[in-house]
Image (cartoon, helix red, strand yellow):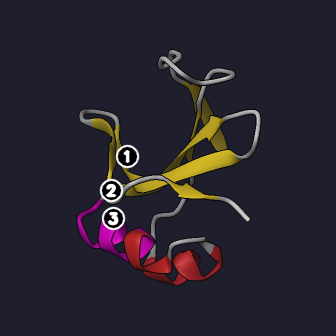
Amino acid sequence: LYFFTLSAILGEDSKPLLRVYPIFREEECEWAIRLDICRYCIKKGERYAQKIIFYSDAPYRIHGCYTEKKGFYAHELPTQSQ
């Protein structure tokens, strides 16, 4: 797995982590947390990624796609991890 660190955003307890998965085929999405977003990214020729923001009460994940040219972009509002 590939990990990239982003700069901190105000209000965070620590720097967020950008996790970019080495998924290149739709059948590799079966273990992704957001299968629908993973499949969407693959169909566009992009990679599934998560931005994880660490707060003192819990981490929050934002799911989206990643490309070297565009970087990370989200497909939904943050959701709390369980």
SS class, disc 3: helix
- How many marks on residues? 3
Q: Indicate the quadrant where residue 12 lies.
A: top right
The x and y percentages for residue 77 are 38, 55
Q: Which mark is residue 41?
A: 3
Q: Residue at x 49, y 78 (%)?
A: 35
For this view, does 40 lie left or right of residue 6? left
Write down the residue under mark 1. Answer: 66
Q: Residue at x 39, y 70 (%)?
A: 37
Q: What residue type is labelled 1?
A: Tyr
The answer to whether marks 2 and 3 mark residues whose Cβ atoms lie closer than 8 Å is: yes
Q: What stretch is highlighted in magenta?
A: 38-45
The x and y percentages for residue 27 are 52, 84
For this view, does 63 lie left or right of residue 13? left
Q: Distance between the residues labelled 1 and 3?
A: 8 Å
Point out the image quarter for the C terminus. bottom right
Binning the other alpha carbons within 10 Å of mark 2 as few (below 14), some (14 to 19) or many (20 upward) gives: some
Whether the magenta-drawn stretch holds residue 73 is answered as no
Main SS of the magenta part reads helix
Q: Which residue is drawn at 48% across and 17% down?
A: 10
Q: Which mark is residue 42?
A: none
Sequence-wise, the earlier of marks 2 and 1 is 2
Q: What residue type is labelled 2?
A: Glu
Sequence-wise, the earlier of marks 2 and 3 is 3
For this view, does 47 lie left or right of residue 32? left
Work out whether 23 lies above or below 34.
above
Sequence-wise, the earlier of marks 1 and 3 is 3
Write down the residue under mark 2. Answer: 46
Binning the other alpha carbons within 10 Å of mark 1 as few (below 14), some (14 to 19) or many (20 upward) gives: many
